Image (cartoon, grey):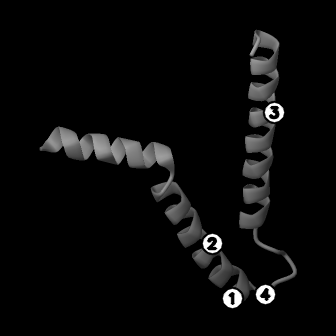
Amino acid sequence: MDKREDESFGKELQKFLMQKIRDLGQWVKPDPTDNLFLQIVKIFFKSIVLLLLTAFSPVVLLFLIGVFIGGL
């Protein structure tokens, strides 16, 4: 692989990740057509999903493993 291929792969990966983050942000936003109670319930469950996504992300898991091994 040459440097140009690495740069294009990096740019494509960055674009893909940014698109997924934007999609997730749109998913989290409440729908203004829903009534207030439904918006509250949806935000509650979506926040739980986001918390689980964050907790099981590879970076957080590596940090937690490192902290656990360091504490032994």
How far, Cα to Cα, is label 1 from label 4? Answer: 6 Å
Q: Is residue 3 left or right of residue 67?
A: right
Q: Nearer the viewer, mark 1 or mark 3?
A: 3
* Residue that numbered label 2 is attached to: 46
Residue visible at 75% across and 34% down in the picture? 14
Q: Residue furthest right?
A: 33
Q: Which mark is residue 37?
A: 1
* Residue that numbered label 4 is attached to: 35
How far, Cα to Cα, is label 3 from label 4? Answer: 39 Å
Q: Amino acid at mark 2?
A: Lys
Q: Say which label, 4 or 2, has the lower sequence index.
A: 4
**Where is residue 6 drawn, in percent x and y?**
75, 19
Q: Nearer the viewer, mark 3 or mark 4?
A: 3
Q: Are marks 4 and 2 in contact (CB under 8 Å)?
A: no
Q: Amino acid at mark 4?
A: Asn
Q: Is residue 7 left or right of residue 37?
A: right
How far, Cα to Cα, is label 1 from label 3? Answer: 40 Å
